[in-house]
Amino acid sequence: MTELVRRPEAEQTTVGQTTHEAQRTYVPRVDIVETDTELRLYADMPGVQPEDLDIRFEKGLLTIHGKVRPRTQRYLYAEYGVGDYHREFTIHEDIDAERISAQYRNGVLELTLPKCEEVRPKRIQVKSE
């Protein structure tokens, strides 16, 4: 019988200070796009169900946590590690927290963080005489 083989993942951490067996936690890869009106964040979080996502924004700290349910299949060979995802970002822009939105599809979380009106660039009209 073939043994289950897992390739070590470079970007994984182990959750400490727990009362149960340590769970692998991965740092999701993220792309961030900034426009004049918003920040848009894309995070790769395969294996997470939408109801298992916990996203919080408080005092300029954006926290993303995705819980992955344990596998039920027995694999002969596996390169994909299983574990939760966790990442935090300090956001220096003034964000309108009431208008933050999130979508999750095909393993990618998309967050839209609209900037407050006060921090958006303003175009100044030049008058000529």
Image (cartoon, rainbow, N blue to C red):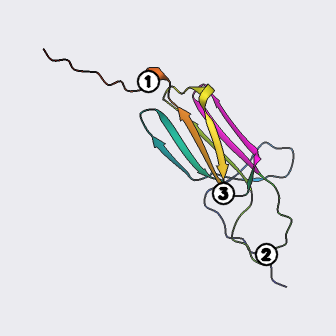
Q: Nearer the viewer, mark 3 or mark 1?
A: 3
Q: Identify the residue shown where x is 26% and y is 21%.
A: 125
Mark linked to residue 106: 3
Q: Is residue 26 magenta?
A: no
Q: Identify the residue shown where x is 47% and y is 44%.
A: 33
Question: Which residue sits furthest top?
Answer: 129
The crowd level at tag 3 (other Cα within 10 Å; few <14, some 14-19, many 20+) is few
Q: Identify the residue shown where x is 78% and y is 42%.
A: 17
Disc 2 target residue:
4
At mark 2, the secondary structure is: loop
- Measure how far apart labels 3 and 1 are at the Cα level: 33 Å
Q: Quadrant of the N terminus?
A: bottom right
Position in image of residue 12 (x %, y %) = 66, 56
Q: Is residue 64 magenta?
A: yes
Q: Which residues are magenta?
A: 50-67
Position in image of residue 110 (x %, y %) = 60, 46
- Measure how far apart labels 2 and 3 are at the Cα level: 26 Å
Position in image of residue 2 (x %, y %) = 81, 83
- Picture quadrant where residue 102 is located: top right
